Image (tube, rainbow, N blue to C red):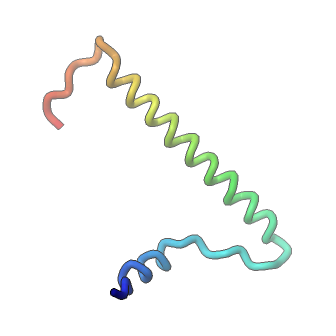
Amino acid sequence: MINTARHTAEGLFKRPDVEDGSNAAKLRDFRSRQILRTREMKLTEMRQRLDKRADPAAPPALFR
């Protein structure tokens, strides 16, 4: 079975490789820092949601 649609979608959302050049190292460093920042932000937001959910003073969420 050929997964043409999946491969096409992966190609659309895949981050392009850094080409060799004067700013290639800067771009690699920037992207790695950006990935780390995004991960930290996701973890922080998840902790905040869990803390908010565990707070007994918060009103119950009956309707979502």
**Where residue 64 sits: x, y (%)?**
18, 37
Q: Is residue 31 above or below residue 18?
A: above
Residue lying at the far left in this picture: please name it. Answer: 63
Q: Residue at x 44, y 81 (%)?
A: 7
Answer with the quarter of the image where residue 52 lies: top left
Q: In this view, does 61 lie above or below 13?
A: above
Residue lying at the far top in this picture: please name it. Answer: 57
Q: How many labels does the image show?
A: 0
Q: Is residue 4 above or below residue 46?
A: below
Which quadrant would the N terminus be assigned to in this image? bottom left
Q: Residue at x 44, y 29 (%)?
A: 48
**Where residue 21 sits: x, y (%)?**
82, 78
Residue lying at the far front in this picture: please name it. Answer: 1
**Where residue 49 sits: x, y (%)?**
39, 31
Q: Which residue is drawn at 75% across and 58% down?
A: 29
Q: Is residue 62 left or right of residue 11?
A: left
**Where residue 42 sits: x, y (%)?**
50, 42
Q: In this view, does 50 lie to the left or right of 38?
A: left
Q: Residue at x 62, y 46 (%)?
A: 37
Residue lying at the far right in this picture: please name it. Answer: 22
Q: Is residue 57 left or right of residue 25?
A: left
